[in-house]
Image (cartoon, coloured by chain):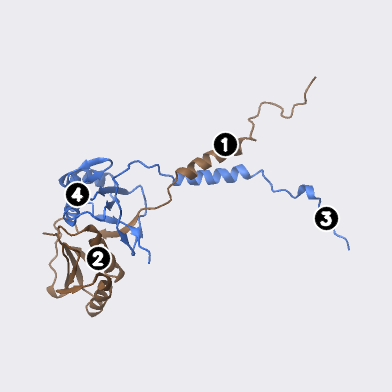
Amino acid sequence: MKFNRKTQLDSEIPTASMPDIIFMLLIFFMVTTVLREYSGLPISLPKAKRIEKLKSKRHTAHVWVSKDGLISIEDKIYKADGVRHIMYEKRVEDPQLVVSLKADERAKMGLVSDIHTELRKADALKLNYSSKTAVD
Amino acid sequence: MARERRFKGGEIPTSSMADIAFLLLIFFLVTTTIDMDKGLGMVLPAEGEELEINKKNILNCLINSSGKVLLGGEPVELSNLSKKVRQKLAENDKLVISVKAHSASGYKDYVKVIDQLKQANATRISIAESD
């Protein structure tokens, strides 16, 4: 019994739906892209094992603390007691706000403790100590 | 010399659409930062919500300025902290661990302590004001 072999010519990958696939990918990346808005301070994050991911970038406010004790929020330098006002405003705008504390591992606890107090006064209670994954 | 027309009527050429879409795709691929923010989660107590806790149920965890840890009055190595805390939690599941750091102690040590407590599945962690 002989099989009818198809000709070599029509064994090509169909390219007609390629633009659709690419558009799908494009839309995915467009939706997931968050262009970097603020640059922050140069810090080296501490390392930890029990790490959890922040759910949404849109509900996250970053507080940068450098090793010299500078506090930066959205590219502006604040004193410890100035954190309250800006975080309170942010908290009012977004009740789901999570504060991501990006503090240098060499920062002093006195300052971090002050920020805790300020955040409590601003009613921004969900805090996340940003850290890298420890390997071992 | 008449050339045969392929399209009748004015249609938008779609042959280059794939290229354009590819270009956009590559742009968004490059600019996307997938690395999510991650770290140790913590919920601060609300202002004026200080609770009175029975002294039996409090385990003090103190960090001094050189990063040494004192757990319930005895010095503990940082690497053993989670084991010790787990033991204490097994004895008393209502235990609240109160972390108090010296104001000159490093944030790194504090994060390590919190990490160890989380590894011991301690859910009730309280942050005492450092003085």
State whether discs 1 and 2 lie on one chain.
Answer: yes
Q: Position of residue B103 (x, y in %)?
A: 14, 58
The answer to whether A46 appears left or right of B70 in the picture is: right
For badge 3, the amino acid type reads Arg
Give the alpha-carbon distance from disc 4 to disc 3, as whole Å.
Answer: 75 Å
User: Farthest residue toward the left?
Assistant: B131
Packing grade of label 3 (10 A; few <14, some 14-19, many >=20) is few
For badge 4, the amino acid type reads Ala
Give the mark, 1 or 2, whose residue is nearer the N terminus: 1
| Residue at (29, 56) in percent of width and height | A128
The residue mark sitting in front, 4 or 3, is: 3
Q: Position of residue B60 (x, y in %)?
A: 16, 70
User: Farthest residue toward the top?
Assistant: B1
Q: Position of residue A47 (x, y in %)?
A: 32, 60
Question: Which mark identifies residue B20?
Answer: 1
Instruction: Tell me: residue A97, above or below residue B94.
Output: above
Packing grade of label 2 (10 A; few <14, some 14-19, many >=20) is many
Query: Label 3: chain?
Result: A
Give the chain ID for the blue colour.
A
Q: Which residue is mark 4?
A: A122
State whether discs 1 and 4 lie on one chain.
Answer: no
Packing grade of label 1 (10 A; few <14, some 14-19, many >=20) is some
Query: Label 4: chain?
Result: A
Give the alpha-carbon distance from disc 4 to disc 2, as whole Å.
Answer: 26 Å
**SS category of the residue bearing label 1:** helix
User: Farthest residue toward the front?
Assistant: B66
Q: Position of residue B37 (x, y in %)?
A: 36, 53
Q: Quadrant of residue B128?
A: bottom left
Q: Which residue is mark 2?
A: B113
Contact, mark 1 vs mark 4 (Cβ under 8 Å) = no
The answer to whether A20 appears left or right of A32 in the picture is: right
